[in-house]
């Protein structure tokens, strides 16, 4: 079993974790969309601190003998998942950036063309219809 | 006057200040009947200043997006401005504008959708180094395996497409090293791809974007890209057939 002091410090760590997330959210430095993942992670951590037997049970299901090893494997797996989702977010933003850049370049050319046409018109007044 | 198709030559240029003037001068002399568009891909040298000074037609991408993004910008422009044919031509002087007619002929006769200028069909002009040719042959074989179509010069960036592929490429054009992948994508869109013989020259100035150190990365990346492109379009087509069969599903 986990000693009481360790448990208390772990609970404190989880609480700190949530405070940091809330702080970022308040500062609007995190989109709620991407925060959900981190909130779920915090929730799972809290759950495991509250009911450590749960972790042991899950680890046995997977056939892992050592508790700490099991915990690390799950953590690493979870981190890899998060990194993968970050890469996917970066890729999607790359695509958006590409579209924006092309759009901007085409608009830039139109503006130049319009300016040129106006200069060519030689200060004549607008004649519409 | 006979009615000609509206043709746009797309010239992606990244740090081509040494070549771009020659290329455009030569092009406007060889083919004054077509429009051209230089796409300055966030160059760090004076390419943009030259385009401005010489009053070239150009798009200016404020950030460097790589050849794929630059060429696609040209396709988007061609699509918006109603061009019938778009031609890609490198900004470094390797591609000779004298071969434009050869390239355009199959499109005008409606015998092909995508025409690739190939330096290996008649083995004339600049043939590239032996190691690079080996790489190209491997990729060519891979495309034959995945699509059943033999294209010899898969990395040639000298190509022409019709209106249908202007639209397709403006929506979806591969990134990074796009040439071989664009061929696979064209075949997967059931396009008729045709190679015509052209002569290429060695670069006039500057340095090629593909250095020797990058070639291994290039081969791995392109191989992967071809396989993924083949797989995803295979799935997409199957899905489309299924939805067509399923009828008006909501």
Image (cartoon, coloured by chain):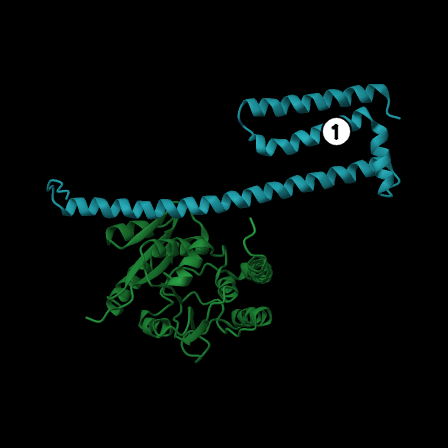
Chain colours: A cyan, B green
Eyeballing the image, is B205 above or below B248?
Answer: below
For mark 1, give the secondary structure.
helix
Q: Is residue A15 visible?
A: yes
Image x and y of residue B202, in percent = 40, 69
Q: Is residue A96 left or right of residue B99?
A: right
Q: Is residue B17 visible?
A: no
Residue in the picture at 66% in, 23% down: A18
Image x and y of residue A127, in percent = 12, 42
Image x and y of residue A114, in percent = 23, 45
Along the line of sight, which residue is nearer the eye, B235 or A66? B235
Residue in the picture at 75% in, 26% down: A46
For mark 1, name the chain.
A
The number of numbered badges drawn on the structure is 1
Along the line of sight, which residue is nearer the eye, A127 or B146? A127
Image x and y of residue A61, in percent = 86, 41
**Which residue lies most toward the bottom here?**
B122
Along the line of sight, which residue is nearer the eye, A69 or B74? B74
Q: Quadrant of residue B90?
A: bottom left
Q: Quadrant of residue B105?
A: bottom left
Eyeballing the image, is B236 above or below B128?
Answer: above
Figure quadrant of the N terminus of chain B? bottom left
Q: Which residue is mark 1?
A: A45
For label 1, the crowd category at 10 Å Cα-Cα, with few meaning under 14, some 14 to 19 and many 20 or more, is some
**Which residue lies most toward the front here?**
B248
């Amino acid at each position: 079993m986990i000693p009481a002091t360790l448990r208390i410090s772990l609970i404190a760590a989880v609480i700190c974790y949530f405070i940091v997330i809330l702080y970022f959210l308040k500062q609007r430095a995190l989109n709620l969309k991407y925060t959900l993942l981190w909130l779920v992670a915090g929730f799972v951590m809290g759950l495991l601190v509250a009911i450590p037997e749960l972790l042991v049970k899950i680890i046995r299901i997977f056939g892992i003998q050592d508790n700490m090893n099991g915990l690390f494997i799950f953590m690493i797996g979870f981190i890899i998942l998060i990194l993968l989702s970050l890469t996917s977010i970066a890729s999607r933003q790359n695509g958006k950036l590409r579209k924006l850049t092309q759009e901007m370049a085409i608009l830039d050319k139109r503006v130049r063309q319009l300016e040129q046409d106006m200069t060519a018109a030689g200060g004549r007044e607008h004649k519409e219809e | 006057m006979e009615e000609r198709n509206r043709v746009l030559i797309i010239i992606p240029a990244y740090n081509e200040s040494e070549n771009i003037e020659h290329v455009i001068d030569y092009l406007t002399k060889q083919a004054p009947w077509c429009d051209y568009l230089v796409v300055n891909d966030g160059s760090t040298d004076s390419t943009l200043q030259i385009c401005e000074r010489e009053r070239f037609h150009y798009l200016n991408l404020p950030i460097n997006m790589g050849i794929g993004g630059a060429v696609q910008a040209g396709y988007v422009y061609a699509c918006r401005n109603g061009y019938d044919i778009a031609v890609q031509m490198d900004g470094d002087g390797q591609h000779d504008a004298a071969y434009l007619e050869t390239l355009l002929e199959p499109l005008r006769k409606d015998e092909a959708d995508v025409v690739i200028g190939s330096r290996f069909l008649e083995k004339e002009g600049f043939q590239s180094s032996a190691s690079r040719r080996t790489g190209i042959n491997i990729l060519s074989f891979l495309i034959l395996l995945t699509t059943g179509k033999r294209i010899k010069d898969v990395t040639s960036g000298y190509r022409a497409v019709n209106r249908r592929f202007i639209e397709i490429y403006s929506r979806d054009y591969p990134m990074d090293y796009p040439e071989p992948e664009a061929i696979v994508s064209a075949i997967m869109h059931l396009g008729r791809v045709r190679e015509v013989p052209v002569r290429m020259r060695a670069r006039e100035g500057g340095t090629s974007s593909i250095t020797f150190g990058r070639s291994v990365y290039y081969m791995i990346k392109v191989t992967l890209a071809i396989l993924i492109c083949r797989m995803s379009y295979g799935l997409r087509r199957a899905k489309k057939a299924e939805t067509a069969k399923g009828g008006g599903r909501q």
